[in-house]
């Protein structure tokens, strides 16, 4: 039985190597779905460690498989690999060497943690029950293309061996360095955009009776959409409906032919998500019709709400408390309003998503997607320790 002190010792020993990998990845950021160098580095490193490698999952996705010495469950650990189209403004000597691309969401750290888990765990096969599948995922940031997670699932990443349970983690500015947090139930928002095109009949502003006014119809639609949260959604559930764009018309004395609305919906529960979608479509179509116009709604379900399984949450919580000490587990009070495509894994198998703190006492942490984004690399050691404890415990096959 490997104890926490030994895990911590081995991770500390591996930390300079993990940091070196992170800085290599940081210097060479790649856009969503085009993580070819990153993917090759992951494959090469896993092979050097003697880890079984599979590729061919949605563009650049990679799976590493570590089989334990005893039977047990298959635990999936997920690490995202993509960067963002933005110019880095830090003065690190390992800053981005690619103009206009930056690892500003910490996915370089996530990928390096995956390699760190592979390095330490491949030397612990004797202690491991079950199998650990390390899932290196492309295109987390690209919600418009549907993200990478659902396509890796389509391409069979959760099969052979079949993944029973999953853990994911994201570097998080609102928790202290050394702490890891999570919560039961909703963890991050579902985020779905919509476009409403309203077609009317143009005419002279002085003769509205000969026209069908799409600006008037759009105005009623914007107002009526606000009834969804106040009149349709359960008061104890949460949702946001925002119209951010209202486009229509070219002149003060012309009734235009068309108007366009664009907006976004955030929800934390799948049933509420579908309820809001159905209401947006019905309100837009029926309101437009009542006013003599026609609305076409392009409503996209992109990332679903990320919901933690209550049983896996409990297991993850006790793993975190065990390896980091009780004070370094934080029960996160509210779900975060951002989207995260780990949600697709969490819909497929019982899962928990964890936040890895990097806030330092007395300092204001730099938020993700900021050109000055940065985190203390010792957080990576904390994350690897938690991943290892979760993998070793969840693999044992005690029912979740
Ligand atoms: Zn991001
Ligand atoms: Zn991210």
Image (cartoon, rainbow, N blue to C red):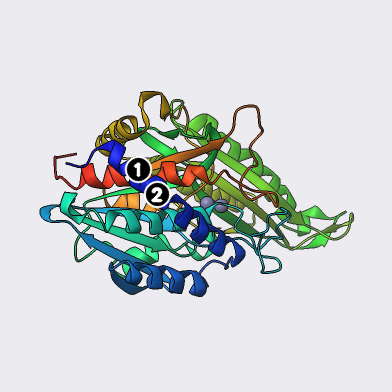
For this view, does 394 lie left or right of residue 370?
left
Residue 215 placement (x, y as % from top left): 74, 52
Q: Residue at x 64, y 50 (%)?
A: 369
Badge 1: residue crowd in 10 Å (few <14, some 14–19, many ≥20): few
Q: Which residue is drawn at 28% across and 54% down?
A: 121
Determine whether 204 is above or below 383 in the image: below
The quadrant the N terminus occupies is top left
Instruction: Give the quarter of the image for residue 122.
Output: bottom left
For this view, does 262 lie left or right of residue 247?
left
Q: Which residue is drawn at 23% across and 46% down?
A: 392
- Which of the two residues, 171 or 118, is positioned nearer the viewer here? 118
Residue 209 placement (x, y as % from top left): 77, 54
Determine whether 321 is above or below 15 in the image: above
Badge 2: residue crowd in 10 Å (few <14, some 14–19, many ≥20): few
For this view, does 150 lie left or right of residue 240?
left
Residue 299 placement (x, y as % from top left): 52, 56
So how many labels did they put on this image? 2
Q: Which residue is drawn at 14% across and 45% down?
A: 397
- Which of the two residues, 270 or 123, is positioned nearer the viewer here? 123
Q: Is mark 1 within 8 Å of ligand 2?
A: no
Under tag 2, what secondary structure?
helix
Q: Name the residue under label 2.
A: 13
Under tag 1, what secondary structure?
helix
Can residue 168 be seen? no
Can residue 313 be seen? yes
Query: How much space separates mark 2 and mark 1, taking CA atoms?
Result: 6 Å
- Which of the two residues, 30 or 253, is positioned nearer the viewer here? 30
Disc on res. 9: 1
Residue 192 placement (x, y as % from top left): 52, 51
Q: Which residue lies furthest to the top in this view?
A: 327
Q: Do the residues labelled 2 and 1 touch (CB within 8 Å)?
A: yes
């Amino acid at each position: 039985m490997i104890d926490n002190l030994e895990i911590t010792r081995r991770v500390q020993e591996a930390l300079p190597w993990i940091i070196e990998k992170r800085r290599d990845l940081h210097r060479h950021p790649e856009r969503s779905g085009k993580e070819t160098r990153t993917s090759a580095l992951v494959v090469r490193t896993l092979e050097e460690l003697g880890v079984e490698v599979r590729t061919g999952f949605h563009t650049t996705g990679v799976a590493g498989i570590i089989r334990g010495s005893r039977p047990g469950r298959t635990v999936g650990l997920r690490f995202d690999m993509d960067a963002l189209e933005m110019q880095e403004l830090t003065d690190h000597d390992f800053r981005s060497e690619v103009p206009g691309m930056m690892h500003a969401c910490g996915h370089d750290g996530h990928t390096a943690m995956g390699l760190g888990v592979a390095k330490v765990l491949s030397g612990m096969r004797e202690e491991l029950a079950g199998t650990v599948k390390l899932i290196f995922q492309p295109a987390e940031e690209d919600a418009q293309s549907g993200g990478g997670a659902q396509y890796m699932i389509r391409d069979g990443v959760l099969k052979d061996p079949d993944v029973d349970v999953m853990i994911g983690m994201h570097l998080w500015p609102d928790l202290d360095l050394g702490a890891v947090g999570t919560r039961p139930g909703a963890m991050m928002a579902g985020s779905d955009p919509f476009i409403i095109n309203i077609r009317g009949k143009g005419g002279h502003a002085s003769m509205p009776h000969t026209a069908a006014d799409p600006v008037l119809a759009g105005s009623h639609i914007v107002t009526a959409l606000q009834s969804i949260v106040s009149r349709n959604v359960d008061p104890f559930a949460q949702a946001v409906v925002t119209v951010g764009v209202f486009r229509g018309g070219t002149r003060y004395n012309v009734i235009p032919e068309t108007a366009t609305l664009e907006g976004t919906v955030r929800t934390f529960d799948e049933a509420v998500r579908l309820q809001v979608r159905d209401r947006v479509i019905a309100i837009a179509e029926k309101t437009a019709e009542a006013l003599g116009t026609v609305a076409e709604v392009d409503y996209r379900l992109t990332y679903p709400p990320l919901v933690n399984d209550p049983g896996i949450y409990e297991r993850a919580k006790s793993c975190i408390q065990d390896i980091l000490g009780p004070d370094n587990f934080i029960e996160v009070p509210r779900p975060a309003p951002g989207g995260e495509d780990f949600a697709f894994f969490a819909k497929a198998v019982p899962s928990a998503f964890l936040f890895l703190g990097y806030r330092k006492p007395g300092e204001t942490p730099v938020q993700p997607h900021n050109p000055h984004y940065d985190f203390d690399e010792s957080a990576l050691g904390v994350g690897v320790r938690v991943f290892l404890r979760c993998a070793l415990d969840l693999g044992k096959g005690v029912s979740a």
